[in-house]
Image: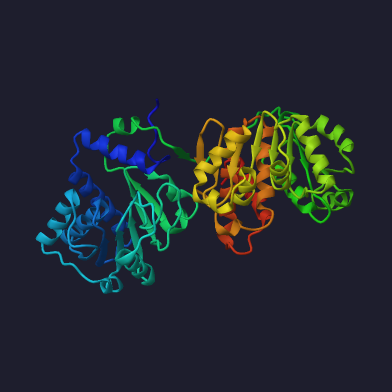
Amino acid sequence: MPMPDPQTALCTTAQVRALDRAAIEAGIAGIELMERAARAALDVLRQRWPQARTLCVACGPGNNGGDGFLLAALAREAGLQASVVALGDHAPGDAGLARKRFLGEGGALASAAALADADVCVDALFGSGLNRAPAGDAATLIAALNAQARPVLALDVPSGLDSDSGTAFDPCVRATATVCFVGWKRGLFTAHGPDQCGERSLATLDIADRVYAGVEPDATLLVPQTLPVRPRDSHKGRYGHVLAIGGDLGTGGAARMCGEAAMRVGAGLVSIATREANVGPILAARPELMPHGVHVPRNLEPLLARASVLAVGPGLGQDDWGKGLWQAALDAGKPTVLDADGLNLLAAAPHALPETCVLTPHPGEAARLLGTTTAAVQADRFAAARTLAQKYRAVVVLKGAGSLVADPEGRVAVCPWGNPGMASGGMGDVLTGVIAGLLAQGLDAWNAACLGVGLHARAGDLAARAGERGLLASDLFSYLRALVNGRA
């Protein structure tokens, strides 16, 4: 098994605990790991807030609190003023040793009021593994951390965040930055995780490579990628023919954006099967697209025969017109990206899918496909994505904060890019076209989905430099073109 890259490997809480145990068995004492974590946290704190002179650390009774006590001790040694607000009167094991060191070196315990007087506050209450909402004094202290205006550095995981699912309990620390120890916890990158963590960094604590080689990560982070340079003798026939199927009355823009997105990432040809009323507007807006008015499924047959990849669902609707085109498209058995009402129709009437197929549901569509609730999907996005991929024997993109890509064999990749401005109409149609355009150029379903999700999210981030509110799906097109060519 090749050694995973800790910077892209995403682990469950249990896997990180196994790494901790393996590091200790390899000869690193638990208290030494704790001190390394504290030093790494102090480095992050001083780099991010170099003017800070006072800090207040909120420490829980476990090892996360031990990290916090040692951070406070090291900060005092470095000439900073550091106080601790502690939950409880004692701590066991290595955490107890850390507490004893801080107090033995003259450190002082303080009340929660000290949080407001610090330049930086530190959350060292619970860390990873919390599976319920904080209560009592812990909840009160988290509320105090969130109420003050100072920046907050979370150690390992913001307290109150489920490190496996990314679910934020109530209350949950909303950190300005989070320094994660040993290995990335997968919940930091999806659901509520990105909002609660702020800026994320990983400290591997100088653990030997052989320790990481013993644990296969649960998932991986996507990394920036592009497509190779084309040969000079290229022609449009080498890069596929996408047929976008959708655009019922009043939703022709969805099909048009899907088609243009496929062209912007390099598809050779793009046709659109849509309502007759949409043909003129699509031609006027983007003459490179080839729209065709389709009244009944048999009108689709010559278009299906010429296409190499299908993008089914944007603006399709669920009435008889949409159902008929949907069934004809799936019966064709060609590589397909299925989105929007293409997914809703599948949930209502199961149908065999092509061998090469990518499903792109948002959480609501995923819930319908699984026969469950949106809340249940969001409570464990990793399990939902894997279950969908296995159930439908397709590659699945579960959209949302920290979009997931899953395949039937259990692989999962997580997108670290994207922004709230992308929560606007048409973004999903663009993603469908991007993935279809990549399939048309010869990528398999897994790689087309991974690259497509990454390009789409990165283009959204570039477009959002002018502001997130008001971001339009069509704003992504120029950035998609630049990114796929390695120019951004």
Q: How many marks?
A: 0
- Residue 88, compared with residue 397, is above or below; it is below
Name the quarter where the N terminus is drawn: top left
Quadrant of res 468: bottom right
> Front-most of 209 and 478?
209
Figure coloring: rainbow
Indicate the position of residue 101 as horizontal and vertical percent values. Answer: 13, 56
Q: Position of residue 245 (x, y in %)?
A: 78, 42
Q: Is residue 237 above or below residue 486?
A: above
Q: Residue furthest front?
A: 371
Quarter holding residue 385: top right
Residue 287 percent location from the top left of the image: 82, 47
Q: Is residue 255 left or right of residue 24?
A: right
Observer able to see residue 271: no
Q: Residue at x 85, y 37 (%)?
A: 300
Q: Residue furthest top?
A: 1
| Above-or-below relation of 54 to 477 | below
Between 34 and 91, the one nearer to me in the picture:
91
Whether residue 112 sits left or right of residue 383 in the image: it is: left
Q: Position of residue 467 (x, y in %)?
A: 57, 63
Q: Is residue 294 visible?
A: yes
